[in-house]
Image (tube, rainbow, N blue to C red):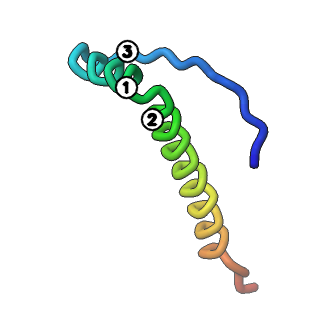
């Protein structure tokens, strides 16, 4: 599908949330990878569609 490579991300989270994230990583190490990939893909698609809609709404301009 795509060429991929690992990226390390460091976040500052509230302690209770950080504890939950660490527990999730222990139980299912791939889960957060899937969630982040989903979120980034969704954001990229939204940006592409938003730009496309803006371009379509501009459309051809009438000559005065």
Side of 54 relative to 20 (left or right): right
The answer to whether residue 56 is above or below residue 52 is: below
* 33 left or right, relative to 55: left
| Horizontal and vertical percent position of residue 34 | 51, 39
Answer few, some or many: residues within 10 Å of disc 1's Cα (few below 14, many 20 plus, some between 14 and 19).
few
Q: Is residue 50 visible?
A: yes
Q: Nearer the viewer, mark 3 or mark 2?
A: 2
Q: CA distance from mark 1 to mark 3?
A: 21 Å
x and y, in percent, of residue 64 in the image: 72, 86
- The answer to which of 52 and 9 lies nearer the viewer is 9
| CA separation in Å, label 3 and label 2 | 19 Å
Q: Which one is in front, 55 or 15? A: 15
Q: Mark 3 Cα within 10 Å, few/some/many (few <14, many 20+)?
A: few
Q: Nearer the viewer, mark 1 or mark 3?
A: 1
Alpha-carbon span between mark 2 and mark 1: 9 Å
- Residue 24: percent from the left, percent from the top? 35, 26
Looking at the image, is mark 1 or mark 3 earlier in the sequence?
A: 3
Q: Residue at x 53, y 49 (%)?
A: 43
Q: Residues within 10 Å of mark 2 (few under 14, many from 20)?
A: few
Residue labelled with disc 1: 27
Q: Is residue 64 visible?
A: no
Residue 44 falls left or right of residue 20? right
Residue 31: mark in rendering: 2
Residues marked 2 and 1 touching at CB (< 8 Å): yes
Q: Which mark is residue 47?
A: none
- Please indicate whether residue 1 sits to the left or right of residue 32 in the image: right
Q: Secondary structure at mark 1?
A: helix
Please tell me whether mark 2 sits on a helix, a strand or a loop. helix
Q: Earlier in the sequence, mark 3 or mark 2?
A: 3
Q: Quadrant of residue 55?
A: bottom right
List the residue tagged with mark 3: 12
């Amino acid at each position: 599908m795509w060429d991929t490579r690992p990226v390390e991300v460091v976040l500052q989270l509230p302690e209770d949330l950080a504890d939950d994230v660490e527990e999730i990583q222990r139980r299912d190490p791939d889960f957060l990878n899937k969630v982040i990939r989903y979120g980034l893909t969704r954001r990229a698609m939204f940006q592409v569609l938003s730009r496309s809609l803006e371009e379509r709404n501009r459309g051809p301009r009438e000559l005065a």
